[in-house]
Structures are given as structure tokens and as C-alpha cells.
Amino acid sequence: MKHKKALSMLLAFVMVLGVFLNLGPIEAAEAKDIKTVTILHTNDTHGRGQENQKGEELGYAKLKTFKSTVENAILVDAGDTLHGTTFATISKGQSIVDLMNETGTDVFVPGNHDFNYGTDRLIELTKAGKFHTLAANVVKGNKPLFADNFVKEVDGVKIGFFGLATPETKTKSNPLNTQGVDFSNYIETAKQQVEALKAKKVDAIVCVCHMGLDKSSVERSDLLAKSVDGIDLIIDGHSHTDLKEGKLVNNTLIAQTGSYFHNVGKVSLTFKDGKLLDKKASLVPYSSLKTLTPDENILATIKKVEESNKPILEKVVGRSDVALEGEREKVRTGETNLGNLLTDAMLEVSGADVAITNGGGIRASIPAGDVTMEQVITSFPFSNYPVKIEVKGETILKALEYGVDKAPEVVGKFPHVGGMTFKYDSKQEPGQRVFDVKVKGQALDVNKTYALVTNDFMAVGGDGYEMFKGSKELGIYPLLSEVLAKYIEKHSPVKPEVQGRVIEAEKAPGQEKPGSTEFTDISNHWAKDKIEYTVSKGLFAGTSKTTFSPDGKVTRAMFVTTLGRFEEKLAPLTGTDKNAFKDVKADTWYTKYVNWAAANNVVSGFGDGTFKPDQEITRQEMAAMMTRYALEMKKQPVPLILPEKFKDDKEIGSWAKDSIYTAVSARLIFGTPEGKFLPTQGATRAELASILYNLSENFNWSKKDQPVVTDQPVEKETEEKTTEKKAA
């Protein structure tokens, strides 16, 4: 009886314990058969070996401590690890390999930046590593350069790993670094590796890859998961994506930590009888790990490296009066003062006409104050150097178009420039975005030869700048970091600014690519873009092949003809066969346009039945004709609030007053910055080009019921909003 009572109490205890653990009594009894393997992972640490409390970067000393607290842990790194800080680059990656060895890294896949020291050096580093370097798709002459897969057994569970490196390495590391190296098809390679690991009877298959989830990449981890069955887990890198709970695609869990040691990834794989029951991904942020006690051995290794680097890094090269902007989100989307400082340094050392460098080469900001060599190298850690090449203006234009074709996405190829300025419209089709390109204040000549300085990475096609490949080389200079340090030293204190070298702006009609006209007398004219518009659209012509004569006079016939050509773009002309005026002959270049204008009440002529086609048109006559055409004939709406009166209002003819204020209200014509209209002054050819441009900008007749002009108040034009103190 005593035994029965004891047995009954034991069973009751098991049942209660089972309820407490959310398990039934049978499951509780079988819990010992359930095993969990934890994969800890990092990616895109970019040489950050030490802890950085301010930057919330964990480092290896506390990573090792954390790893020691996790049972059945496997440590995996998904690349871009050996390069990126002075701590890493001075030893060409060896300092990071030593820390990975001491931390107990099990699996490593090389990222594109791990090739930055060259493939031969990467192979040396991985041979020095006590971890398994996997990259099944990296070959040279059909011979694999790294191992393809690896099986690790933990607590009786067999985990099969295979590795893939991004084919973007060919362009996102200097192409010379991977010369002769090929990247086989990652989908087909993955399928082969899955079958190979199945043959080894593993319990789970893990792909460690440096592919990323960036939509601008052709090869991605989500596409891999979608295309290849049988991968249980993908440990990913490259796109710096925070996946707090992972991403499930085709029953494959994708995990990635972001970047720079801000998080440690943790994936729990739960097995029963060798069968994978569950998989969960999470991120352990720096804030949860910062109180850990760092590993003493790793701290000692770090200190030794820092002491040997100190004399090089502590040197003060100069001073900056402003903070130098180098954050990833800024340098990969727009102009920054650090980008301008670098390109100015490149221009000075090379004597080139223009400089172009990629935002992806700028890796960190520099605070205001004394600038040390460590800060310079941290911002420009790559072993890149300026190269001066000879290119046509057309090549420069292609490079700029390529550089902004993904805007506003955050991409490393975004161009920073020196010696030149340009504008782009991200709403336009790629390849048709760039306009208003100027070199030293002059319009870019697509046929002219220029000396361009860029970095050696881009000069050989890096980051996709294929248009530079094969260009004639004019000069090679020291490392970018050295060039910049010497420039700061020479010009200290420096105070670079964002100067409008790269401007994102809406591309107005007619802002064509450089070279759309060859007029030599409009390169610096306030109406250059508007003149090019009228010419490109066939509304106007130059006075010769190379001149436009922007300040030349406009006759009444000329104005009506250009207005008629504008209307022809919208609809067939009507009333062109009826001669309306006795001084307009039946066979002149302007006859049909004058007849059309008269038939549609755009013009009325003079009381004597004449039109006076050769007479210079006044600004008030021009305003009256525009109002009749755009607002009466085309019936476009105008703002309800009219502008203030002009100071010379009394000089405006009573017959033209309403038309002028209506045209100004509709933003078809403007007065001067001084508040005058100059009604009796003759119009210039440049002003006429501006009028036609304003018609196109303000009235979009291709979209019904969507007029640009609304019933909003009209802003008063000011001197700041005009390009010269002259009626436009």
C-alpha cells in the first residue's frame, strides 16, 4: 500500500509538472527526447573588433562571453567581417581572424568586402582561421577556392552547412581583387549542395550566405529560398537588414542581424528523434548584452593590436571647423560636405577637370575639431587610390545617369562630384534623369575630352561603372586616405559645405540632356534650359547653327508663329486658309499661323486691317495674345486672387491691363524684381522661349481635368526667385 501510495504521488507530481511546463503528462515524460541547437550569428561587422559603447557595437570580447552562456551553440558569421576599420585594415584582416579564432567561430562565408585585400590574401586569412570558410559558388578555373559544405554534430544532432558568396563581389569590391575568379549560378549551386547534404543524412540544412534582401540586387536570399526547396535556414548578410523575428519564405527561415555588431542573431532549432520540429529567429540587441563581463583573453589580444597601431592612428593631420558627414544613409543618397572635401582633394592632387567618387566608399563621419589619421582611415578604410583618366563628356553623362538610376534608394554607387554640378529627377525613367550638367560653370560638352579623376575601384568598372573601363590612364596617386589627410593638413582648418553640386529637382519640360543644342551664346544665359526646350520641341530655331541670339528682338509674326507651333503639338490648326490681314501674304513662313490666330481670336490686328508682322512685339501685346490663347481659346482656369499692381501700372494700355494681370496670375509671364512690368518694352527671343516654357509647365493639356493652375494665391516674384533683373 505504501508503494502504491508513493507511486500515485509521483504520477500526480509528473502531471502537475507537465501542466506547469504546458506539456501533457506523456509529453513531459518524453521531453528528454527533445533537443535544441542554437545558432548564434553575426554579419557585416566590418572590422569592428572592439566594443564601442557610444555606437552600441558589441565586439568579440562580450560575444565570447555571451556564447559561453548558450547551451549547444554554434557560432556563424555571414561575411563583410575582415575589413572596414583601422583595427582590421592595418594588419590586412589578421587582427579580426585572431579574434574570430579566440571567440570560437565555427562557420564563415566571405562577403564582398572580405575580398578587398585581394583573393590571395583572403585565402591566406581563411587558412589562418580555425573556422570553416564556406563558399561553394566561388571558383577559379573550375576549381573551388573554398570548401563547399560542412557538417557539425551537436548533442547527437547533425547540422549541415553550405556557403554562398554574392556575385556582386565582382563589382562591389575592386574588380582587380577577383580577377580570374568566377561566381557560379547561386541557385544551381544551392540545389547541388542541398542534395549533397541530404546524402550525408543531416537533420537540418543551413545556408550561410552573403546575398542580402536589397531589391536592387539580382541575387538575393529571398529568391534563393523561393527557388530551392530543402533549405531549413538561411543565415544572411550584405543588405544590413534587421530581421527581428526572421523572414519565412517557402518554409525557409531567413535570419540577418543588421550590421556593425548592433545585434547578435539567435536561431533556435528544436528537434525530436532527429526531426526538425520548430525554428525561431530573434535578435539580441547590444542593450541586452552590454552588462556582460568581457573575455579577458580577447581583451588582451585587442590591447596588443591597439598598442601596435597607436603611433599611426594618433597623428593629428589637421582640423575641421564643421562635422564631416559620412553616414551611410546620407552619402548613398545625396551630396555631403565630406564627399565634397574628398573630391576637392582628388582634384588638387591630380589636376583633373572633374572628380567622381562613389558614396559607398565613404564609411563614417568625422566630428568637428582635430582630425586624426585614425578618423580619416575609418572614413576611408579601403585601399583605394585616385586614378586620372581621359573621357568624353558623353562618358561623364553616362556615369551620372548610372549613379542616380536607383534614386532615391540607398545605394553605394551614388556619385559625389568635384569641379562640376548636375541636377537629376528621380521621377524620370533611368537613363533620362540627369540635366543641367556644368563643368566649372560651363555646360557639359558631350563631344569634348575631359580629364576625370576617380578611384581605382570605379576606374576599372567597380560598382558597375563599366563606362570607365578601358579609358586612357593619365595618372595614379597615393591612397585616398593619404590624399585626404594631406589636403586637410594643407588647408587646415577646413570648413567644407554642401554647395549644390548634386541637386534633386523636378525636370521641367525641355530640360534635355547636355548637347541638345550647340549654341555657343547661351551657355551661361538665365534662359538656357528654356531656350533648349523650344528648340528641341521644334517651336523655335537659332539664328545660325551655333548661335541663338537670346537678346534679339521678337516680331509679331515670330511670336504668333511660335504660339501656332505650340498649338500644333496639341491639335490640328483651324482657319489657316483664310487670309485675315491685307499685309500678310499667302505664301510666307508665318501665313498659316497668323490666319489660325485670327480665326481663333488670338489676334485682332489693327484698325486699318493690317497685322504688321515685322513690327517688334511689346510685352503687353504678348501678354494679351497669350491670355486670349491659353485662357480664352483653351479655357484653362486661373487663380481667383490677382497679383498686386505693378509700379508702372499707369503705363499699361487699358486694352491690355486685364490680360496682363490675368497672364501674371496664371504664371505665364512675370514682372521685374523691382515690381515693374515694362509693358511697352520690346520682348527678346529669350523671353519668348521663357513664355513657351511657362505654357508647357503650367498647362498640361494631355491630362484632362488636371490643370496645374489652381485657385491658390499667386506668390509675388522676388529677386531671389529670378535669375536676372530683367523681365522674364
Image (cartoon, rainbow, N blue to C red):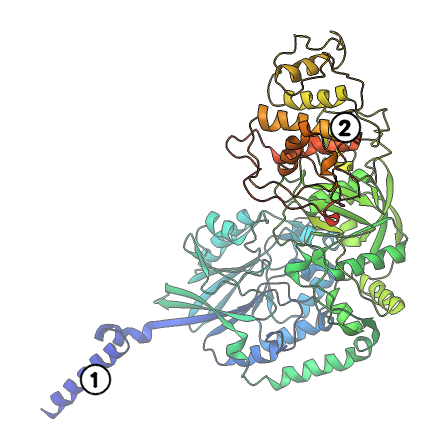
Q: Amino acid at mark 2?
A: Thr
The residue that appears at 46% across and 62% down in the rendered structure is 246
- Picture quadrant where residue 59 is located: bottom right
Task: Check disc 2: other Cα within 10 Å, few if <14, some if 14-19, many if 20+.
Answer: many
Q: Measured from the top left, where is residue 424 in percent x and y?
A: 69, 44
Q: Nearer the viewer, mark 1 or mark 2?
A: 2
Q: Measured from the top left, where is residue 219 in percent x and y?
A: 57, 49
In this rendering, the answer to whether 167 lies above or below 397 is below
User: Is residue 406 shown to the viewer in this render?
Assistant: yes
Q: Quadrant of the N terminus?
A: bottom left
| Foreground residue among 270 and 145 | 270
In this rendering, the answer to whether 262 lies above or below 634 is below
The residue that appears at 89% across and 67% down in the rendered structure is 490
Residue 78 in the figure: left or right of residue 677: left
- Identify the disc placed on residue 13: 1
Q: Which residue is mark 2?
A: 618
- Picture quadrant where residue 523 is located: top right
The residue that appears at 67% across and 63% down in the rendered structure is 327
- Identify the disc placed on residue 358: none
Residue 514 in the figure: left or right of residue 279: right
**Which residue appears farthest toward the bottom when viewing the image?**
2
| Foreground residue among 648 and 704 | 648
User: Is residue 180 shown to the viewer in this render?
Assistant: no
Q: Amino acid at mark 1?
A: Phe
